[in-house]
Image (cartoon, helix red, strand yellow):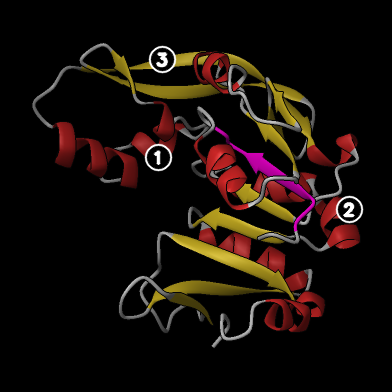
Amino acid sequence: MHHIKCFVDIGANCGQSANSFRSLNGSATIFSFEPNPFCFSILSSARIDKFFPMPFGLSDRDEFADLLTPVIDRLLVTPLSTMDINRFAPGAMLDEWINKNHHDRARAFLRQRLAFGEGDRFNLKPEAVKIDVEGHELSVLRGLERTLWRHRPIIFLETNGAEGVDRFLRSMEYRAYTIVHDDGDSAHIRAFSFGANKLPTNLIYIHLAQSQDFSWMYPGLIK
């Protein structure tokens, strides 16, 4: 990650990814987008050089939209905030997670009307993008389409609605990779094929035009 000059963090929460990235790269510019005001108050207080926190989310249009956050025993569970109420429907992934981990606790939902913007409007020049938006990934990517064509950044994302995301990114000449841990502390990445493997929690997308450069900069990482 030492070669990256611009890192874009979408769904920044309280700044976990920004801080982790800064520990690996001390010079890159970091843009973090987070619409939740509770999280943004923590995110914006981070003492990180060349760091630009933005108090809104990204989407495929400029809009105000509802963000739903589970509240369990009066505590906000902000990492599970989503714009898709169906993700909390009985049997859906987030409903199952809450039932498994907090089945005996009082629960509610906080609904907030918050701002989102089309990503291409901001003329970002990323070399790496992280997306963690609990089901809103495809809208975020569509809003960044011109940016992705122009700069071909590495994309790190959670696998929510993954097959639709994969179709979109494959049409833009990206391919999916997954992290494989070797013995000890080392790891490498391997091409991922939908349907042939269990879906991992996270995927990495690398543009075909960048994959050779990536292999050259990090020998042995792609296998």
Q: Which residue is mark 3?
A: 110
What amino acid does circle 3 point to? Leu
Q: Is residue 5 magenta?
A: yes
Q: Indicate the amino acid at tag 2.
A: Arg
Name the element at disc 1: helix
* Image quadrant in which the N terminus is located: bottom right
Which residue bears the numbered disc 2?
A: 146
Q: Label 3 neighbourhood size at 10 Å, few (<14), some (14-19), many (20+)? A: few
Measured in 3D between alpha carbons, the distance from the residue under mark 3 to the one under mark 2, in whole angstroms, is 34 Å
Q: Is residue 141 left or right of residue 85?
A: right
User: Is residue 114 placed above or below 17 in the rendered structure?
Assistant: above
Residue type at mark 1 is: Arg
Residue 87, label in figure:
1
The dot on residue 168 is none
**Local secondary structure at mark 3:** strand
Look at the image and give the residue range highlighted in magenta: 4-12
